[in-house]
Amino acid sequence: MTENPIRNHAENPTGKLAHLNVLISGASVAGPALALNLARYGARVTVVEKAPDLREGGFAVDFRGHVHRTVLTAMGIWDEIHAHQTHMGRQTVVDADGTPRVDLPAEMMSGDVEIFRGELARIMYERTRDRVEYVFGDSIATLTDSPEGVDVTFERGAPRRFDLVVGADGLHSLTRRLVFGEESRYLRFLDHYVAGFGIPNDLGLERTGRLYSEPGRGVVIGNYDGDPDRAGALLVFRSEKLEFDRRDVAAQKRILAERFAGMGWQAPVVLKALEEADDLYFDAIAQIHVDRLVKGRVALLGDAGYGATMGGMGTGVAIVAAYVLAGELALANGDHTTAFAEYETRIRGFAKGCQKTSGNAGPFFAPATERRIRSRDRMFGLLSSRLLTGFFKKLTEKAATAIELREYPRP
């Protein structure tokens, strides 16, 4: 492995966890979040990421409620997130001719503050890059857990031993497969697929979006960053489970073209833009349900342990869980047996509660029938009324605040 040339904390580590050497797999959001929290306690942290660089862009992610704010403030990034937020406004459900049907409040779609996933990862990376070793373009090959540590081999770098390993490598986690078993044991398909990519901003949107649904499929076009020339498209469709290669982008485009053929509103324009898109994201809407989050000296964090493709407040859960895991390790003076057990106890119920909300993501964007489309619109028309604004806000924050944070040692 090639070490980060900016590496000045390892020679003279100080802090409550200075004796701890931790490997984190994944540098999306959960990985850098844990790296930031562990580095605050002086731990020696290495983050390995298979992508050649920090991943930019991605979907916008949001935070809501006092728990998210408390954690982000403790991490020292609350103000910076606000400085780079999307400022996304209301989004509107429309008919096939573009006529508005109902407005969706910003609080529902964007929480208290919203930021692009890539921008959030960059903020945490910049905060940790001179205290944490980041290795890009490599990944774990094997893990051997023992009482003395975890012996790790890499696809490219030299073998090394770590005290702890944390899999923060997403819904399709390699760490989980190596230690806990095949993905098929834990992934629950939720009868829908989702795709996202950039398109020209032909509708002239400015920090707002439009949603159009037909039975079993939905199209969203939104402008999140104020760029007058660019927008983002989100496609959701109901389906049986499909067999496809996640690396075969051409095949994924063909699936989308077939599924959205003949759809109204802006669907033909979106499909035309899809032909040239070089930033396509395509995956099943699914959840991860593992029997355990920890095994020996290995733990799962974020989507690797309790992820949902969309709608499960995955980023908020990952940030809170990273804070809790680091805090429990500090509270236990690095005793992973005690800390891992507390982490699992405190996070499991919280994560499951947030996952429950993601079960509605597919049917929200792509209701199965015309009747359900009308029912959705009536419900959100009622909830977005001025009389129910406060109730609606509490409703959207319920799962995000369903955890009591402990007092952890000061870094």
Image (spheres, rainbow, N blue to C red):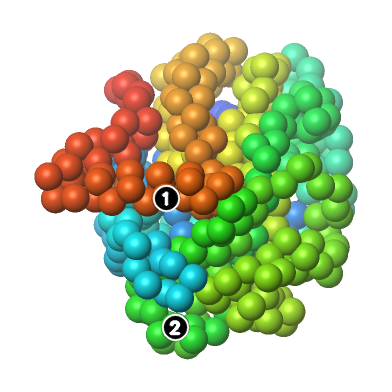
Q: Is residue 138 above or below residue 24?
A: below
Residue at mark 1 = 374
- Dot 1 crowding, Cα within 10 Å, few <14, some 14–19, many 20+: few
Residue 172 or residue 1, whichever sits in front: 172
Residue at horizontal 62%, vertical 22%?
293
Q: Nearer the viewer, mark 1 or mark 2?
A: 1
Q: Is residue 247 visible?
A: yes
- Dot 2 crowding, Cα within 10 Å, few <14, some 14–19, many 20+: some
Residue at horizontal 49%, vertical 64%?
212
- Residue 263 drawn at (x, y percent): 63, 68
Q: Residue furthest left?
A: 387
Q: Is residue 309 above or below residue 3?
A: above
What amino acid does circle 1 point to? Arg
Give the quarter of the image for residue 68.
Answer: top left
Q: Is residue 161 visible?
A: no
Residue at horizontal 78%, vertical 42%?
241
Left or right of residue 257: residue 373 = left
Q: Give the quarter of the figure containing the C terminus.
A: top left
Q: CA distance from mark 1 to mark 2?
A: 24 Å
Residue 325 or residue 388, whichever sits in front: 388
For residue 203, which numbered disc appears in the image? 2
What amino acid does circle 2 point to? Leu
First reached walking from the N terminus: tag 1 or tag 2: 2
- As helix, strand or loop, the secondary structure at mark 1 comes to helix
